[in-house]
């Protein structure tokens, strides 16, 4: 059995079409078909049910697919390990986050320790983050809410109080706290439905007997501060998103005192480079310093 056979098999299994798979792999259809045929001969069973150039994995194929994916994943991890051992202090950390408010300062501080490390950061939903982690496409995720799934290590690193942000001209701006009931008739700005933070605060408002009325719903949490400052609406915001330069007043929510948990996530099976290990320890210590 050859590595090339496994690579071709995975692409055909993904596309279930000989012509498209050959185009994707930049090989001829004839060469691709012969390679898959040799693999089936090695295994002694057909892996696909065939209808013309369309293929569909059969039971043998589905079972072999899981093993082939694991085998190639382990080989990729081996390549990562070798690159890590030979790269010295350089390299790139692949990161995914569900909220970016804490990231700039965190990366700035880590870069002081490891100036040659580069970063590639993706802003994603919790569902997309879980997919990236399962596929081993990122080193770490920073997520709120935490993600509890097989193969994903989840460590809560910070518990962040959620506050009410109002413009300094607002009727509540002279108070230090507010009850949810007092917010019944307010206009809110917030992230779109489907984000963990949005679902959580909506549920919180319902527990107080009302449905929050949004005048703005977006996918950029960092924009909410400017909308509050512009008096478009008020917002639920984590305490770590506060900025002393903004003309915004923050109030504690009475009785409920809601929080968001921030978790550091990684794939248990993914090789962790020396730089990534150092980054993990740095993140844990960084959040401890915020408490």
Image (cartoon, rainbow, N blue to C red):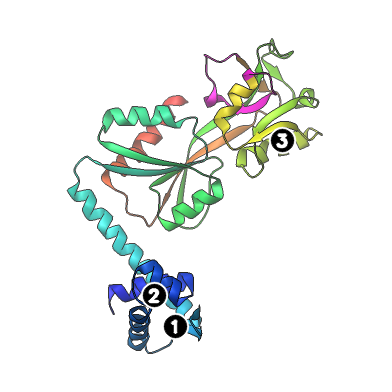
Is residue 47 visible to the viewer in this orientation of the structure? yes
Q: Residue 71 in the image: x percent, y percent?
A: 34, 68
Magenta highlight on residue 232: yes
* Residue at which label 3 appears: 204
* Residue at which label 1 appears: 47
Q: Residue 186 in the image: x percent, y percent?
A: 77, 24
Task: Tell me the element at label 1.
Answer: loop
In percent of the image, x 69 and y 10: which residue is there? 174
Q: Verify CB contact (< 8 Å) between mark 1 and mark 2.
A: yes
* Residue at which label 2 appears: 9
Q: Verify CB contact (< 8 Å) between mark 2 and mark 3.
A: no
Which numbered disc, 2 or 3, marks the residue that appears first in the sequence? 2
Q: CA distance from mark 2 to mark 3?
A: 49 Å
Is residue 66 visible to the viewer in this orientation of the structure? no
Q: CA distance from mark 1 to mark 2?
A: 9 Å
| Dot label at residue 113 | none
In percent of the image, x 17 and y 49: which residue is there? 86
Instruction: Answer left or right for 71 relative to 56.
Output: left
Task: Tell me: residue 83, above or below residue 155.
Answer: below
Query: Which mark is in front, 2 or 3?
Result: 2
Q: Residue 148 in the image: x percent, y percent?
A: 53, 51
Query: Residue 109's image quarter?
Result: top left
Q: CA distance from mark 1 to mark 3?
A: 51 Å
Task: Tell me the element at label 2.
Answer: helix
Q: Verify CB contact (< 8 Å) between mark 1 and mark 3.
A: no
Which numbered disc, 1 or 2, marks the residue that appears first in the sequence? 2
Mark 3 crowd level (few <14, some 14–19, many ≥20, 10 Å Cα): some
Quadrant that contains the N terminus: bottom left
Q: Residue 185 in the image: x percent, y percent?
A: 81, 25
In front of the other: 259 or 73: 73
Q: Give, as a single range, the part of the protein colored magenta.
A: 229-247
């Amino acid at each position: 059995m050859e590595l090339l056979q496994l690579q071709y098999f995975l692409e055909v299994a993904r596309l279930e079409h000989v012509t498209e798979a050959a185009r994707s792999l930049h090989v001829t259809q004839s060469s691709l078909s012969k390679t898959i045929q040799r693999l089936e001969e090695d295994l002694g069973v057909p892996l696909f049910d065939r209808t013309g150039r369309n293929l569909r994995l059969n039971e043998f194929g589905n079972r072999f697919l899981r093993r082939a994916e694991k085998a190639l994943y382990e080989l990729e991890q081996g390549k990562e390990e070798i690159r890590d051992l030979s790269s010295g202090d350089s390299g790139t950390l692949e990161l995914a986050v569900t909220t970016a408010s804490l990231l700039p300062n965190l990366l700035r501080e880590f870069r002081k320790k490891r100036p040659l490390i580069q970063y590639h950061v993706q802003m994603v939903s919790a569902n997309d983050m879980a997919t990236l982690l399962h596929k081993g496409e990122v080193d770490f995720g920073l997520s709120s809410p935490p993600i509890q799934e097989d193969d994903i290590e989840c460590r809560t690193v910070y518990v962040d109080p959620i506050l009410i942000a109002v413009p300094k001209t607002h009727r509540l701006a002279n108070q230090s706290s507010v009850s949810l009931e007092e917010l019944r008739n307010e206009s809110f700005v917030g992230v779109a439905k489907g984000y963990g933070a949005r679902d959580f605060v909506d549920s919180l408002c319902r527990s107080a007997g009302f449905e929050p009325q949004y005048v703005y719903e977006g996918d950029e949490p960092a924009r909410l501060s400017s909308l509050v400052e512009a008096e478009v609406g008020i917002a639920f915001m984590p305490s770590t998103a506060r900025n002393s330069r903004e003309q915004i007043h923050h109030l504690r929510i009475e009785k409920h005192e809601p929080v968001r948990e921030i978790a550091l996530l990684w794939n248990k099976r993914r090789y962790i480079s020396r730089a990534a290990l150092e980054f993990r320890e740095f993140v844990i210590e960084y959040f401890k310093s915020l408490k």
